[in-house]
Image (spheres, rainbow, N blue to C red):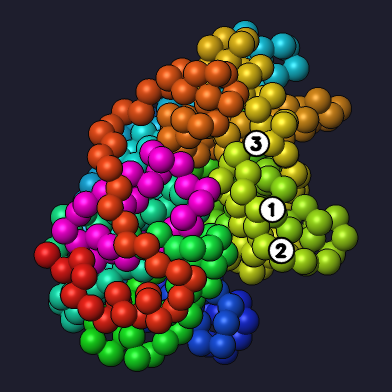
Amino acid sequence: MSSPSPELEFVSTANPSLRAGLRDALLSSVPEGGGLWVPVRIPSLPAGFLDCHARSGYAVLAEAVIAPYLARDLGPEVLGDLCQESFNFPVPLVRPEGLPPSVGGRASVLELFHGPSAAFKDFAVRLLVRVTARVLSAEHPRLTILAATSGDTGGAVTEACDGVPGVRAVVLYPRVGVSPVQESQIARRRPNVVALSVDGTFDDCQALVKRALADASLRRGEPLLTANSINPVRLIAQVPFAFHARRLLPAGRSMAVVVPSGNLGNVGAVQLARRMGLDLRALVAATNVNSPLPELFRTGVYRPRRSAPTLSNAMDIGSPNNLDRLLAWREGGPAVASVTVDDAQTLDAMRRVRAAGGYVMCPHTAVGWKAAEDMLAVPGAPDEAVVFGTAHPAKFPDVLREAFGDAAVSRFPGELPPPAPLKVGNDFEALRDVLLSGAGRA
């Protein structure tokens, strides 16, 4: 069992004099004056840490990685219980078969999509909701979790909040660009969930959420919290992924991690893992054409842009939330690379991998796979490339149909009832009315 850590303290990336403990960071997910919360102290895990956890279940490993941040505030036993509740599904590392020697035996997929919403965000959101309820429920028995989604976050939030006493979820998603499977997960009827189908892009949804979080009048009745990756606890919950991948590879093999990236929370979590001591040769943020990150790393110029629909829709983000965190942990630390993969390359990767050995990837994972292939082809590349498999391929039937002519090449593991969203314009007052109403209160 992990020993208690020092009490967690966060600092704003925009104002080093602005600090907050766990409770205050949960209540004000965005620091006053802008920026993002990051831990003041980045702990170093002890030598031999992974050897000690070579045979541990994922939840036990995750507890040990997260404990330096949360064990003092929650108590070690509570943190252990919450990790067991949150991470109660498998996390396998899979090597697709039949590939050429330059990739076969060197590239693998860490399947992060075996949770209830079939996407990697289940890990972070399930822990976040439980930590939030534990820390705040005595003082605030009624909470509202507010989130914008380009696809997978929404399903993870609604699944995580479903049935949690006193917690209401309000989720905004763009009317165009979310797959039918994703919309069913986000907007199926639940007594404590309100799904808003917004006439706009994900960036519009995100702007509405940020405006609501900054509106003090909306927090007078009850706390208004966010489950988007701007919430620092959510990012901390994703740090164990890379440690888990490392222990599943043969000892002595150098490792790269390739992360399909949109809002940059997951790649930021891997960079944080490196700052904690993870042995990692390379980290690549694989993006679609919407991301400003490759241009920023190449030229030093940051140019956010309005996102356009792509096949990897959960990454259709032109102004990523977590950029400040990634840059803060990149400065003076290990390098991070970023590459762009377009829709044609995405489809080609999906087709080649399936033709070689029957493995079906979602379009986001395929973006990462293409980036991994290109990296492994360069002399001096790491021995192994682990691609984060971010979502179950059956969540994207239209893309499967376009790639293979058959949407049934992958079957979704759960039920998909008809969605029942509230349709709103790109309108802050409509969101405000919903938040002040009793909607979603069972």
Identified at 53% across, 72% down, the residue is 207
Q: Is residue 179 magenta?
A: yes
Identified at 31% across, 80% down, the residue is 433
**Quick check: can you spot residue 207?**
yes
Percent x, y of residue 442: 12, 65
Label 2: which residue? 305
Tell me if mark 1 has few (under 14), some (14-19) or many (20+) residues whose alpha carbon lies within 10 angstroms of its own: many
Percent x, y of residue 217: 34, 91
Say which of 432 and 423 sits in front: 423
Q: Amino acid at mark 3?
A: Val
The answer to which image quadrant residue 250 occupies is top right
Q: CA distance from mark 3 to mark 2?
A: 20 Å
Q: Amino acid at mark 2?
A: Arg
Q: Assign a secondary structure to mark 1.
A: loop
Say which of 11 and 372 sits in front: 372
Identified at 69% across, 24% down, the residue is 348
Q: Is 252 rendered above or below residue 150? A: above
Percent x, y of residue 157: 34, 55
Query: What segment is highlighted magenta in the picture?
Result: 168-194
- Point out the tag, 3 or 2, that comes first from the N-terminus: 2
Residue 367's disc number = 3
Label 1: which residue? 290
